[in-house]
Image (cartoon, rainbow, N blue to C red):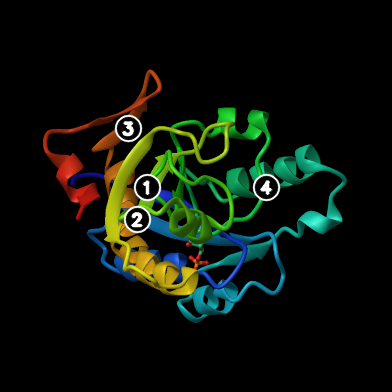
Amino acid sequence: MTGRRRRTAVLISGRGSNMAALLDAAADPAYPAEIVLVLSNRPGAGGLARAEAAGIPTRVIDHKAYDGRAAFDAALDAALEEAGIELVVLAGFMRLLTPGFTEKWLGRMINIHPSLLPAFKGVHVHEQALAGGVRFSGCSVHFVTADMDAGPIIGQAVVPVVPGESPDDLAARTLAAEHRLYPAAVALVASGEAALADGRTVYAGDAWTRVTLT
Ligand code: GRF
């Protein structure tokens, strides 16, 4: 990787374990994304304290203070612009975004979801996977588009399902896979080795192997 590190914001709503994995990766000056802002829509998000402890600027934009999604997204956009953000990383950010916002950040905003998309979108993902009787679950990183959990996939990690396990057990093992996958996927997008083109993810050379985890 050559060149400048991408100015990156991580958006959270809760505990922020994926954010923490990204902060750890980005502590290496050679990592292509520099996390310059952690932003939460919930004032009490646990991840805020972790970011502050790492010396990363944090900001809260409480969605409850806004009249509707468009007004909230406008405030979010203003905060990102103010910080000179080039890459937006959603990490357990539990707000649906308006099409205007997703269109503006298209190709520059990514999300992680705890299933092998396109299976099991939305919430209660591990319950869905266990009810579906699948032998493999996992996690996916994708570009964010207007349709929830449906944007072009950048990378995936596979997690075998243990017969009889609980949704919490599957969630915990999937989360460990997320913590491996997300730093690798953010690095690929920040370095330009994965990019969105004509509604598909395109990769430089064999960079895809770094986000195809078994
Ligand atoms: C993760 O499972 C992520 O895939 C989903 O929300 C959860 C967030 O966990 N979108 P954390 O806040 O990163 O610990």
Cα gap from disc 2 to disc 1, whole angstroms: 5 Å
Q: Are marks 2 and 1 in contact (CB under 8 Å)?
A: yes
Q: Residue furthest left?
A: 206
Cα gap from disc 2 to disc 4, whole angstroms: 30 Å
Mark positioned earlier in the residue sequence (3 or 4): 4
Mark positioned earlier in the residue sequence (1 or 3): 1
Q: Nearer the viewer, mark 3 or mark 4?
A: 3
Q: Label 2, on which residue? A: 138
Mark 4, secondary structure of its residue: helix
The residue shown at (30%, 54%) is 136
Q: Quadrant of residue 214?
A: bottom left
Cα gap from disc 4 to disc 1, whole angstroms: 29 Å
Query: Which amino acid, mark 3?
Result: Ala
Q: Label 1, on which residue? A: 116
Cα gap from disc 3 to disc 4, whole angstroms: 23 Å
Q: Nearer the viewer, mark 4 or mark 1?
A: 1
Q: Nearer the viewer, residue 173 or 200?
A: 173
The numbered mark at residue 80 is none
On whether ligand 1 comes within 8 Å of the CB at mark 3, the answer is no
| Mark 3 nearby-residue class (10 Å; few <14, some 14–19, many ≥20) | many
Query: Which amino acid, mark 1?
Result: Leu
Residue 29 percent coordinates (x, y): 26, 63
Cα gap from disc 1 to disc 3, whole angstroms: 20 Å
Residue 189 relative to residue 42: left or right: left
Q: Label 4, on which residue? A: 76
Q: Is residue 82 above or below residue 14?
A: above
Q: Label 3, on which residue? A: 195
